[in-house]
Image (cartoon, helix red, strand yellow):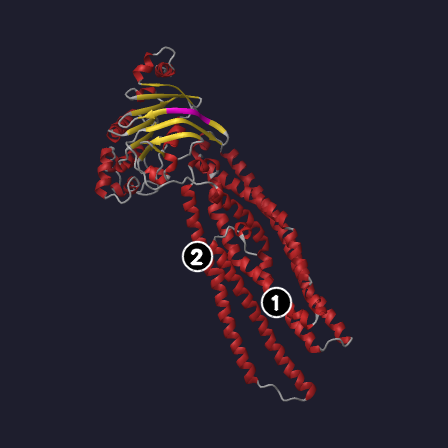
Amino acid sequence: MFGKEFQRRYALSDQGIKNTKKGVFWTVIVNLTVMAGMGILYLLMAKYMETLTNEAPLPKSAMFLVMTLVFVLISLFTHKQQYKATYGLVYGEVKALRIRLAERLRKLPLGYFGKRDLADLTETIMGDVNRLEHVWSHCLGYLYGSFISTGIVAIVLFIMDWRCAIACLWGVPVAFGLLFGSRRLTKKNSEITKEAAIQVSDGIQETLENIREIRATNQEERFLETLNAKIDRHEKTMIKGELHTGIFVNSASVIMRLGVATTILTGTNLILSGQIDFMKFFMFLLVITRIYAPFDQALALIAEMFMSQVSAKRLMEIYDTKTAEGTETFHPNGHDIVFDNVSFAYDNKQVLHGVSFTAKEGEVTALVGPSGSGKSTCARLSARLWDVSAGVIKVGGVDISTIDPETLLTDFAMVFQDVVLFDDTVMENIRLGKRGATDEEVKAAAKAANCDEFVEKLPQGYNTPIGENGAKLSGGERQRISIARALLKDAPIVLLDEATASLDVENETKVQGALSRLLAGKTVLVIAHRMRTVEAADKIIVLENGRVAEQGSPTELMAKDNSIFKHMVQRQNASANWRI
């Protein structure tokens, strides 16, 4: 029952399976305990009937009071254990699931996040996990526990009288057969609703992120109409899904409750024909007041249980994705970066074709070429943010595919054009470069990156919150914080992705001064779009259509006839003379 297929279907861990079994066990005990309470009523009624028919003495009330008290105590104990098993343990499991999920995402290659939409991932981490949590705590234990306890009671009923037992229980398999028969439709509706919900999240996120552009182009009405259409579609899919679910669930409930009528009719006919006595009929009447109750909650949530399988499938896709593994020890012989016949494909689209070059320690190696030529891809592959499709990348003679990415990245500092900052203070954003760095170390790095100039003007200095992604700072100020972070890390390899391309002249001069201090003596890989920024580079690698078209020093390449680099320099110099 609780094998590997079941475990995957509901995205349960090994501990989750154990917790589910405990929930099922205590649900069975609770249901049987409640049914035992009906037995006390049956015994009391039997004693009174004996008094009426045989003039026997009235039953002693003290005995039944003791039995009732024992029943109440046992009932309280079993219900408490059931609560712990179905709720308490599950909440701990959900906490562990979110931690495992975060750890898994942390180890996935960066390419995975390029394939998955941010809103989609957010829906998986929050919405799908919440749905599974509800199913684990409210449905699995109750449903399977109810099946087992009802099976045990059914055996007893068939021993007592098979005809009344069939009249009492026939509705249960029919009701659940109807529900399980509708499972495919329920899952399909859930997938459609989930897709619509993701589109709404996408639309809201896109609108908020691009609000300035939307207003600047007077497109508010068009974007709002599109967003409203997505919300309306989500609402319609939810209503449709709820309607289908409601029809099947309520039909199943009605069918199951028809067992009350068939039990009364069957029992009455059997009494009239003298085949059973009144007390046996009375016992079945007591049973039908409770035998359907365990399924009430399960019936209400069984549709959610089917829908949760869609959530579990999305969750398991993350666990099935191959992580970037490797050894946690890294002892390179120097920090030369060597690309040896490297190829890389992204979503079946070949980006790099047999790329080979060496970025030497203590030198600045610049990657240049037109957009889409593979410059950023090479930089990210060198830090194992993605894994190569073919070929080898070595750092200090060590194949980086054998090194755990987190271990490898301790030797890398990155400064990209698009700076990522957190909604925290200046101090903590810089401290991100080195865990446990003292305030003095942070301030020293900030000073070296020319941050102190603008930090002194902030209301709380280094303890000033800078807003989401540094919204309260200018582009140059954000860039200098990024450089300060890299200076604090003081890694032997530095990756630069045109860190000054979007800055004004004054800020560019300040950032370049900070970069000079950062790059001294390091292995530097620079992605360059403006040729004048790499005039002092030691080596130029020109990429074109994912291949190394030419390489050499700036002087060597400028001296060549028909040099791509020379042509790029000439074109940029010509465009520099353009005026409005």
Residue 372: image x %, image y %?
44, 25
The residues bearing labels 1 and 2 have C-alpha atoms spaced at a distance of: 31 Å
**534 is higher (above) or lower (below) than 149:** above
Q: Would you say residue 384 is visible in this rendering? A: no
In primary-sequence order, the first of circles 1 and 2 is: 2
Say left or right for 186 vs 475: right
* Residue situated in front as seen by the camera: 503 or 343: 343
Tell which of 67 and 4 is nearer to you. Answer: 4
Left or right position of 543 against 5:
left
Within the magenta stretch, is there residue 355? yes
Q: Which residue is located at x 63 percent, y 77 percent?
A: 42
Identity, as a three-letter code, of the amino acid under mark 2: Gly
The quarter of the displayed image where residue 38 is located: bottom right
Q: Which of 501 and 304 is in front in this view?
A: 304
Q: Looking at the image, is 393 positioned above or below residue 250?
A: above
Q: Give the range drawn in magenta.
A: 351-356
Q: Which image quadrant is residue 143 in?
A: bottom right
Circle number at residue 92:
2
Q: Give the residue displayed 65% in from the left and 60% down from the top.
A: 253
Residue type at numbered disc 1: Ile
Q: Quadrant of the C terminus?
A: top left
Residue 511, horizontal then vertical, whole percent? 27, 29
| Residue 127 drawn in magenta | no
Q: Give the overall secondary structure of the magenta segment.
A: strand
Q: For numbered disc 2, what is the local secondary structure?
A: helix
The secondary element bearing badge 1 is classed as helix
Label 1: which residue?
152
